[in-house]
Each structure stands twice: as C-alpha cells, then as structure tokens.
Image: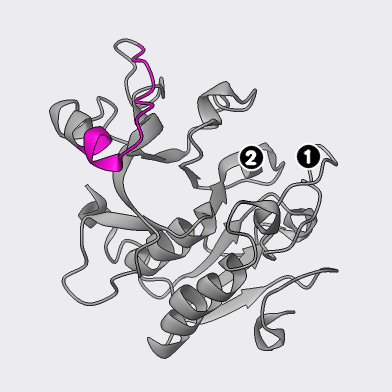
C-alpha cells in the first residue's frame, strides 16, 4: 500500500505537524503538509492525516475530515469510517501488530483515497531501496511521519509542534508530548539518531520550530 506514495512529491518541501504549541507557527507555506493525530485540529489547510495512536477512535477529533488523504495504522484502521465507508468495523485492539496485519490483509480499505499501513514497533527505519511496505513506530507518530515524508520524496521536512519535550497540546492546553511517555527518556535520542540523522545522511534537510524544553538538536531548530 505504501508504495503508492513513493516519489509522489519528489523534491518538495513538506510540513510535518504535531500537537505541540509550535504547531500554530505553521502557515501553509510548504508544498505539502501532513498532520499527525490531534494536529488534525489545526486551522490551516493540509493534505494528509497520519494516525496511529490506539486511542484515536475514542478522540473527539477522530471523525473530523476535510477531504484529506488518511493514512492509518493497522491497529485502528478498522474503526476509520473513511477507510471503510461501507460499514464501521470494530478497532483491532490486540497486543501484537502481526494480528492486525493479518486482519488488514483480509480487509483492504474501501476508500481508494485512504490507506492503512503495517507497523513495526521500535525497529530501526529501513531507508534502503527497495523500501519495505511498513513503517516503524519508535514511540511517537512523528517517527512514522518522517518515514512517509521520505517515501514521498521530500527534499526538506519542516516540523511544527514536534519537539520531543513535555509541552501542552496546542488545542487543549493540557500537558502531553512524547517525553512524558513510558519510554520518554530514551525517545528523543532514538528519534534523533534513527530518524533525523539518518535522513540528513540521505541528503534530506530537516528543521524544527524552536520551543522551550525542546530536546531536539540545536542545529535543526529555527
């Protein structure tokens, strides 16, 4: 399924938008924009919604759609009415992704403009050609977002609302962010080494909006 995105936006500048406060700095100046999970509430226009949080079907913004292409993780794909407009399926709430993968193989999305993807937990991203038909989830949806952006052929990826720090969500004022998670202390280092530095090594420019408490490297903050 993911192979349909390969090179789709070759050479583009792409915005990757998370839910931190600096998401509000996004002004739709990039060629393409991907919003992650709750960032779907951003007022500015975007092109793709990428979701993986297993609690997303419980969120009030789950059913918000503005005509964007939806790219949804296998664990919750069955609960997305855009992927399955012919009838709502129950979320595949299982402990192991392989079970969700098998379900997805038997139930391909019905909406041709929406996609589901397989996930490998805490695995190093595979940027070698040919690219695999799955994404890695390193503890945060931004991992998946960077991989999708690379597959699309982005020459530059500008991150908004992604700082790997414990900050409030722009849409609620409540504290959240990846650092407060179970693997919070290891996550920023994993994100930097496995994703940002890997993409830089492949010639992709990566930037992030500077914010208080950011745990991203100074050389990418603007």
Quadrant (top left/top right/bottom left/bottom right) for the C terminus: bottom right
SS of the residue under disc 1: loop
Q: Which residues are magenta?
A: 88-101
Question: Residue at coordinates 64% horizontally, 51% vertically from top-left?
Answer: 181
How many callouts does the rendering have?
2
Question: Residue at coordinates 67% horizontally, 76% vertically from top-left?
Answer: 216
Query: Quick one: label 2 or label 1, which is nearer the N terminus?
Result: 2
- Of 148 and 10, nearer the camera is 148
- Of 17 and 215, nearer the camera is 215
How packed is label 1: few (under 14 Cα within 10 Å), some, or many (20 or more)?
some
Question: Residue at coordinates 42% horizontally, 38% vertically from top-left?
Answer: 70
Q: On the image, numbered disc 1 is attached to which residue?
A: 171
Q: Is residue 203 visible?
A: yes
Is there CB contact under 8 Å for labels 2 and 1?
yes
**Residue 182 to residue 99: above or below:** below
How packed is label 2: few (under 14 Cα within 10 Å), some, or many (20 or more)?
many
Residue 163: where, in percent of width, then height?
70, 66
Labelled disc at residue 79 = none
**Residue 185 to residue 221: above or below:** above
Q: On the image, numbered disc 2 is attached to which residue?
A: 38
- Of 73 and 153, nearer the camera is 73
Q: What predominant SS class does the magenta segment belong to?
A: loop
Q: CA–CA distance between discs 2 and 1?
A: 8 Å
Question: Residue at coordinates 46% horizontally, 42% vertically from top-left?
Answer: 52
**Residue 33 to residue 66: above or below:** below
């Amino acid at each position: 399924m993911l192979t349909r995105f390969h090179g789709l936006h070759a050479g583009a500048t792409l915005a990757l938008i998370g839910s931190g406060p600096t998401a509000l700095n996004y002004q739709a100046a990039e060629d393409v924009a991907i919003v992650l999970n709750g960032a779907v509430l951003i007022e500015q226009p975007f092109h793709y919604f990428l979701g993986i949080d297993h609690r997303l079907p419980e969120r009030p913004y789950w059913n918000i759609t503005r005509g964007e292409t939806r790219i949804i993780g296998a664990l919750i794909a069955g609960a997305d009415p855009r992927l399955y407009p012919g009838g709502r399926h129950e979320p595949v709430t299982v402990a192991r992704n392989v079970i969700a993968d098998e379900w997805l193989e038997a139930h391909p999305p019905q909406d041709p403009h929406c996609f589901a993807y397989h996930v490998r937990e805490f695995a190093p991203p595979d940027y070698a050609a040919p690219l695999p038909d799955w994404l890695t989830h390193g503890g945060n949806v931004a991992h998946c977002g960077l991989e999708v952006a690379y597959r699309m052929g982005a020459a530059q990826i500008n991150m908004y609302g992604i700082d790997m720090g414990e900050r409030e969500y722009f849409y609620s004022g409540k504290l959240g962010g990846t650092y407060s998670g179970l693997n919070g202390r290891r996550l920023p280092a994993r994100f930097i080494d496995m994703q940002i530095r890997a993409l830089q090594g492949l010639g992709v420019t990566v930037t992030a909006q500077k914010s208080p408490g950011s745990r991203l490297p100074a050389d990418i903050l603007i």
